[in-house]
Image (cartoon, rainbow, N blue to C red):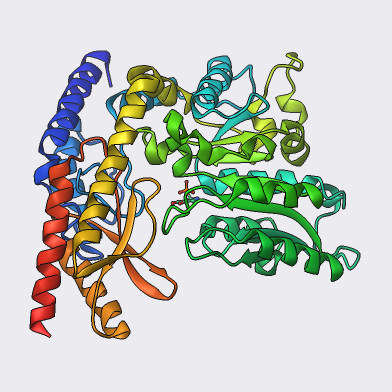
């Protein structure tokens, strides 16, 4: 493509994106299609000769948009609602243009050094202490997997050299997380060859927080059985209810048993940018690693997860491996990012975060996060005031778990399943569900920059209307 065409189509696409955001409110949040519909419209054979950008862009409207779930829609309230942003989109665009592979400092000085600086800015914004160094991975699942691998390096069982299979000399290694912890912890444990029995799930209290007494007891019991407890994963902002594990009570348990403490703050870590909420990370000054996802609640387009780690040497001990063809003359303290992870080449993700932090500034970020939490508390107050609904968990951030009441417990599960189906079927909103104490719960999460009180009010109206309709039809 010549430079003139690049400009023409580039400008056209930027206009297209601006139009998309202007009209997104009118699009159905969930793609109104059935599985296989898009595949059926796409040719099964690859194109033999090149096609024009006119045609390709035309197919974005014709084929791709109708098959999109619009994560950027202001009435997307499912899972953790997220938000891309203009500076983040520009960062992605430039990153694709530079196409750097930040494996060595030499292969991408800008990416390597910007990552260090921008993650230190974010650390300061979150009030994390200066002992933490940040590193970017794609997702929290991968950040946590790296943290647990680093933790395992401390076990001193020569796992890097000899592996774990075929070793009768190796006792069961165990990681501990609450029963509310994200499934990524279990996946990390599986990936690292510890097996699902390598994760012990600790019960939670009535507010879905890890029970530290049960944790201490589990570790003691496992030690008595000859196991090696080596890592605790605590969560700040659990996936179902956004509950906060009592980090300060968990810290001394980890210290007593010389275990690595990893804090999964994938969603809620961003909230610490609001000074009044920095207490949520209290205790992290004595943890070993913390993960937070700017792609969740810090207006950074997917993907960008940050692992803050106090012991980069342990990460390097787990992952550094330099073949001859990757040796360079730059010596420590120069960072070679390939040393601290499974990937060799890495995308230039720091660029978009740098642009987001500069565009919003700490004040701008605080204002948006505070507004999201206000909207969630307004929604929670409507639920609380309604005789037909009940709230199922506290609302420390921007997630509300609730459900419609029914005379019978089993009826309530079915009623709420039907409400979920019905409101999502309108195309106007998208909410998700979870199960709490065995009970089916509806879940509304706020995190989009363009969500206003009227979007939240409309969601509440639809949920009430459909609950009434379903009740009256049964
Ligand atoms: N940890 C928590 C608490 C989460 O809620 C999630 C996802 O929602 C994850 C980890 C995994 O995030 P990612 O998609 O970045 O792997």
Q: Nearer the viewer, residue 368 or 344?
A: 368
Say whether residue 404 is left or right of residue 292: left
Q: Tell me where residue 14 appears, x and y as whole percent.
A: 20, 25
In this figure, what is the number of numbered marks?
0
Compared with 330, 86 (above or below) is below
Say whether residue 324 is left or right of residue 61: right
Say whether residue 175 is left or right of residue 465: right
Instruction: Residue at 62%, 66% (x, y): give it.
Output: 201
Q: In which quarter of the image is the C terminus?
A: bottom left
Residue 84 in view (yes/no): no
Residue 392 in view (yes/no): yes
Q: In which quarter of the image is residue 329?
A: top right
Q: Tell me where residue 27 appears, x and y as whole percent.
A: 12, 47
Q: Quadrant of residue 146?
A: top right
Q: Tell me where residue 261 appears, x and y as whole percent.
A: 68, 46
Say whether residue 413 is left or right of residue 15: right
Q: Nearer the viewer, residue 234 or 199?
A: 234
Instruction: Residue at 18%, 52% (x, y): give it.
Output: 29
**From this viewpoint, which residue is outermost toward the right?**
169
Q: Tell me where residue 16 appears, x and y as whole percent.
A: 15, 30
Compared with 395, 190 (above or below) is below
Q: In which quarter of the image is residue 289?
A: top right
Q: In which quarter of the image is the N terminus?
A: top left
Q: Which of 267 and 18 is in front in this view?
A: 267
């Amino acid at each position: 493509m010549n430079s003139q065409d690049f400009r023409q189509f580039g400008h056209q696409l930027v206009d297209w994106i601006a139009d998309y955001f202007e009209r997104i409110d009118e699009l159905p949040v969930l793609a109104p299609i059935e599985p296989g519909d898009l595949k059926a419209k796409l040719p099964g054979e690859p194109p033999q000769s090149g096609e024009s950008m006119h045609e390709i862009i035309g197919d974005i409207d014709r084929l791709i948009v109708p098959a999109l779930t619009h994560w950027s829609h202001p009435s997307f309230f499912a899972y953790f609602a997220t938000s891309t942003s203009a500076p983040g989109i520009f960062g992605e665009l430039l990153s694709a243009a530079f196409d750097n592979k930040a494996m060595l400092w030499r292969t991408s000085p800008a990416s390597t050094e910007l990552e260090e600086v921008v993650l230190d800015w974010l650390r300061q914004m979150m009030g994390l202490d200066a002992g933490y160094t940040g590193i970017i991975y794609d997702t929290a699942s991968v950040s946590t997997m790296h943290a647990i691998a680093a933790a395992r390096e401390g076990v001193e069982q020569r796992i890097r050299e000899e592996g774990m299979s075929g070793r009768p000399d190796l006792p069961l290694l165990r990681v501990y997380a609450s029963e509310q912890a994200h499934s990524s912890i279990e996946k990390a444990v599986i990936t690292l060859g510890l097996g699902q029995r390598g994760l012990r799930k600790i019960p939670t209290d009535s507010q879905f927080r890890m029970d530290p007494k049960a944790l201490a007891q589990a570790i003691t019991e496992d030690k008595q059985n000859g196991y090696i407890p080596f890592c605790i994963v605590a969560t700040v902002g659990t996936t179902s209810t956004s509950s906060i594990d009592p980090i300060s009570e968990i810290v001394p348990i980890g210290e007593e048993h010389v275990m690595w403490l990893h804090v999964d703050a994938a969603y809620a870590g961003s909230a610490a940018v609001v000074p009044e909420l920095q207490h949520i990370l209290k205790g992290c000054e004595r943890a070993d690693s913390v993960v937070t996802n700017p792609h969740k609640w810090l207006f950074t387009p997917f993907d960008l997860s940050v692992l803050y780690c106090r012991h980069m040497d342990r990460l390097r001990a787990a992952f550094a491996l330099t073949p001859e063809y990757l040796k360079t003359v730059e010596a420590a303290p120069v960072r070679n990012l390939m040393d601290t992870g499974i990937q060799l080449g890495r995308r230039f993700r720091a660029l978009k975060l740098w642009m987001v932090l500069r565009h919003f500034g700490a004040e701008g970020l605080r204002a948006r996060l505070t507004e999201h939490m206000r909207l969630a508390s307004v929604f929670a107050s409507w639920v609380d005031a309604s005789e037909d609904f009940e709230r199922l968990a506290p609302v420390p951030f921007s997630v509300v778990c609730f459900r419609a009441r029914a005379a019978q417990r089993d009826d309530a599960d079915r009623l709420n399943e039907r409400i979920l189906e019905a409101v999502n079927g309108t195309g106007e909103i998208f909410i998700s569900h979870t199960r709490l104490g065995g009970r089916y719960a509806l879940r509304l999460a706020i995190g989009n920059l363009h969500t206003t009180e009227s979007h939240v009010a409309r969601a509440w109206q639809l949920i009430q209307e459909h609950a009434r309709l379903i009740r009256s039809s049964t």
